[in-house]
Image (tube, rainbow, N blue to C red):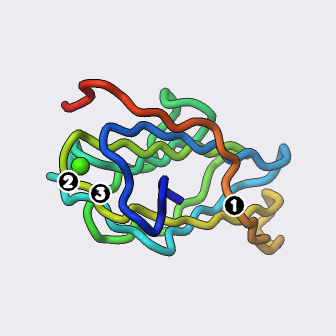
Amino acid sequence: MSPYYPGYYATNSWCEWRITAPVGHVIRLEFVYFNLERGDIRCLKDYVEVLDGTSADSTSRGRFCGYNYPEMLESSSNNMLIVFKSDSKVVRTGFKAEYYTRKGRVDQSFVLHASFMYVKCEVLDNFDM
Ligand SMILES: [Ca+2]
């Protein structure tokens, strides 16, 4: 979940959550709350971006902002990175997501996990785009 959730998140934030499942597992991410500043279609102000891997250079599975909940996302491997970024103006109450993992075979059921692994969250200077 975003910093201070269900309170307002801070301005000028950059946060990353990394989810790592055992090798051979895939990750399903489901947003259960989503309320960010509404941006244009590129979501340049505040956004959540889900990446299919371990770094910000990994393939993006989508960048999300505004009030519409992102659809459920599944990783192609056992790693997923969630990035949250806010600019210097207008804050909302952020997001909450849950994740499930399963062995790669489709006949295995997903198992819900309680929380994200915390990686880092920092305040940036002059990060407006
Ligand atoms: Ca903002």
Q: CA distance from mark 3 to mark 1?
A: 21 Å
Which numbered tag is attached to residue 90?
Answer: 2
Residue assigned mark 3: 65
Nearest-to-viewer mark from 2 and 3: 2
Instruction: Compare marks 3 and 1 and give the one earlier in the sequence.
Output: 3
Q: Secondary structure at mark 2?
A: loop
Judge left or right: residue 39 versus residue 113: left
Q: Position of residue 51 (x, y in %)?
A: 51, 42
Residue assigned mark 1: 115
Nearest-to-viewer mark from 3 and 1: 1
Q: Amino acid at mark 1?
A: Ser
Q: Secondary structure at mark 1?
A: loop
Q: Residues within 10 Å of mark 2 (few under 14, many from 20)?
A: some
Q: CA distance from mark 2 to mark 3?
A: 13 Å
Residues marked 2 and 1 touching at CB (< 8 Å): no
Q: Position of residue 53 (x, y in %)?
A: 61, 37
